[in-house]
Amino acid sequence: MTRIHPEDQEDVQETFEPLTAEQVAELRKQQPLLSVWRVVGVQVVLGFLVAALVWLVSGQMAAVYSAAYGALAVIVPAALFARGLTSRVALMNAGAAVFGFFLWEMVKVGLTVAMLMVAPRLVNDLSWPAMLAGLIVTMKVYWVALGFRKVFYPVRPT
């Protein structure tokens, strides 16, 4: 950890300049916010693609339903999470937003676990590998969102 000496601290304070409104606007154009609804939308598309790929590979509808259910075990909680994060209450102040984030994240994880626990009862002839494929592919969209800016980030005219 780097410590600043008292005589150097004055120099640091003097060199700090807050951004102007124009500089902030320019910075936001260069680094737009991630849209949680775009992530959910891409998860839906990939869930359909995984189910279609499972159908092409296996030809078994039980495996297709399993893959689709695995994708839904990620998509439904993610959509609920996105709805919670974009609600009016979450946008009121920073404290409510932070609390809302953690609350909705716990709801999302809990709902995913609950959906996985009831999967054998809801999906006839459940194929665990197919369900896990749907689950993993749709879950990895969060990481892919960090790399593909044009797909996930809103495009603003310059």
Image (spheres, grey):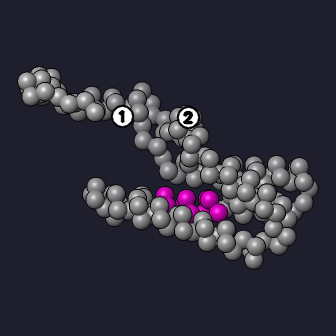
Quadrant for the C terminus, please: top left
Q: Which residue occupies 52% across, 64% down? A: 108
The disc, 1 or 2, on the residue closer to the chain's N-terminal end is: 1
Q: Which residue occupies 62% across, 59% down? A: 74
Q: Position of residue 53 (x, y in %)?
A: 82, 49
The answer to whether residue 3 is above or below residue 66 is: above
Q: Which residue occupies 79% across, 57% down? A: 129
Extent of the magenta region: 73-83
| Other residues around mark 1 within 10 Å, as few (<14) / some (14–19) / many (≥20) | few
Q: Position of residue 106 (x, y in %)?
A: 47, 65
Q: What residue would you read off at disc 1?
A: 28
Residue 147 image label: 2
Please identify the quarter of the rendering in which residue 72 is found: bottom right
Q: Is residue 65 left or right of residue 81?
A: right
User: What element does badge 2 sit on?
Assistant: helix
The answer to whether residue 49 is above or below residue 115 is: above
Q: Is residue 4 left or right of residue 99?
A: left
Q: Is residue 15 left or right of residue 53?
A: left
Please identify the quarter of the rendering in which residue 99 is found: bottom left
